[in-house]
Amino acid sequence: MKKSTKIVVGIIAVLVLLVIWGISGYNGLVVKSELVQTAWSQIDNQLQRRNDLIPNLVETVKQYAAHESEVFTQVSEARSKLAGATTVEDMAQADAEVTSALSRLLAIVENYPELKANENFIQLQDELAGTENRIAVARRDYNEAARSYNTAIRRFPTNIIAGIFGFDRVQYFEASEDARQAPDVGDLFGD
């Protein structure tokens, strides 16, 4: 083989390797991006499940505590905000408000021993507790997928492919400042 033919073959081989590397890197980023979207969907599903349980829980408590309307209003408003949230940050804030309102609602239950013994209420409370656990797992899974994706798009040389094809960082699901503080339920007990 002539020297010029060897050079051409060498250049073609390098180009083929670069194309294979580019395709592999791109496909890897697509997979990670889809994992982030899937994990986000799971958070959304679990938040919706909780949103669907809340009216039943509120109605059960309402039957026993008709004069606690302020808490019911707060729960309803928080649910509406969560349903309308579109960004990770908005959803985290709305989720914190729902959690806080539910804490106040469940604190009311302490004043009604017959409600705590009600079979429907116990079942709803168990379902809500299970849903809260699922939400926590879904958040953790989302943040893990987001971490993996964000790391991949920042690492060299994949960051070149990410920049070329517009793969941007995703936000982590973080608790809002309000969610980091325990809700004040003292007013509900006359403290």
Image: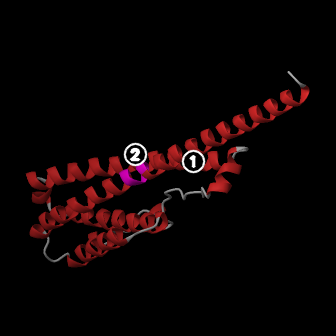
Residue sitting farthest toward the top = 1
Residue 55 visible in the snapshot: yes
Q: Quadrant of residue 152?
A: top right
Q: Residue at x 75, y 31 (%)?
A: 13
Amino acid residing under circle 2: Val
Within 10 angstroms of label 1, few (less than 14), some, or many (20 or more) residues?
many
Mark 2 vs mark 1: give the one in front: 1
Q: Quadrant of residue 61?
A: bottom left
Provide the residue span drawn in magenta: 38-42
Earlier-in-chain disc, 2 versus 1: 2
In the picture, the quarter occupied by the N terminus is: top right
What's the colour scheme? secondary structure
Is 146 or 31 nearer to us in this picture?
31
Give how far across and how far down residue 108 sits, in percent.
Answer: 23, 66
Residue sitting farthest toward the right = 3
Q: Which residue is mark 2?
A: 137
Give how far across and how far down residue 176 sits, in percent.
Answer: 49, 65
Amino acid residing under circle 1: Tyr
Q: Residue at x 15, y 51 (%)?
A: 122
Residue 182 lies left or right of residue 131; in this view the side is right
Q: Which residue is mark 1?
A: 149
Q: Circle 2 sits in a helix, a strand or a loop, which is it?
A: helix
Give how far across and how far down residue 165 sits, in percent.
Answer: 62, 55
Is 88 or 100 nearer to us in this picture?
88
Spatial CA span between label 2 and label 1: 18 Å
Q: Circle 1 sits in a helix, a strand or a loop, which is it?
A: helix
